[in-house]
Amino acid sequence: MTPPVAAATDRLLHTVDHLPDDEWGAESGCAGWTRGHVIAHLALNAEGLGGAVRGLLDGVPTLMYLSNEARDADIAALGAAEPDEVRERLRTSSAFIAAVLDEVQALPADATFERTPGGIRMRAHDVPRLRLREVEIHHADLRAGYTHADWPTETAAQFLEHDAGRHAGPPVVARATDLGRTFAFGEADQHTPVVTGTASALAWWATGRDPGGLVTSSTGTLPTMEGR
């Protein structure tokens, strides 16, 4: 496993291990999901990503999820299980994907797998980055003491670069005060709104989440970003 993913996973496991059982049913930052559902999703995401890459390594193409409906049903079921069961599932799946990520570089650069039957194809070499996003963003979504402000600066910068590169909405420029650099979301010009804040606050906002007044816009109105 890459060092950033390993470190992020250790932080997540520490939070989950110390989250009291009677607090698992509290609302998370993901609409409609409790903390238990978020943790269940993280476990199943590790199984899905890890299983798909493992299939490529073994020469047996494997879907990440059987379907979107099956994914949602599995999250609902595991999210309602006893906390100890979900903790163990997260720990086991985290170890599984860690072992897989140690081998992913052995795959061709163009190796891909399907997320669902006939669905989008995902690059195996993108899996470390994808898993890092899942772990860091959803760890903060737990609202259990860990926030985007705890993300390493280089992780926040990576998230901003990725989201800027895939942005399809109206252009906006993000100015990270702690990095001394900007990130262009779309084709910017002199009229493009400039959103200013720390890299972690900007990266949180770029996922479509509420930065809670930690970022400001040159127009006085903070642009709304697509949720992820």
Image (cartoon, rainbow, N blue to C red):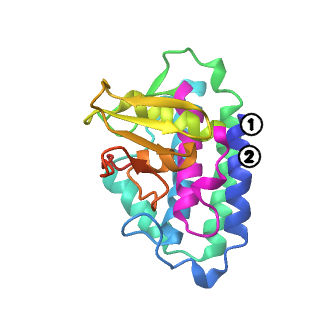
Residue 167 place in picture, x, y as percent: 34, 33
Q: Secondary structure at mark 1?
A: helix
Residue 148 place in picture, x, y as percent: 58, 54
Asked if residue 47 is positioned above or below residue 189 in the image, the reply reads below
Q: Main secondary structure of the magenta part?
A: helix
Asked if residue 163 is positioned above or below residue 213 in the image, the reply reads above
Q: Of the residues shown, which amino acid type is indicated by label 2?
A: Ala
- Compare residues 45 and 31 and report the one nearer the observer: 31
Would you say residue 137 sits in the magenta stretch?
yes
Residue 64 place in picture, x, y as percent: 45, 41
| Residue at x-position 53% and y-position 52% | 137
Left or right of residue 157, residue 73 in this image: left
Q: Quadrant of the N terminus?
A: top right
Q: Residues within 10 Å of mark 2 (few under 14, many from 20)?
A: few
- Judging by the rendered image, the residue that carries numbered circle 2 is 7
Q: Which residues are magenta?
A: 125-153
| Residue at x-position 37% and y-position 59% | 72
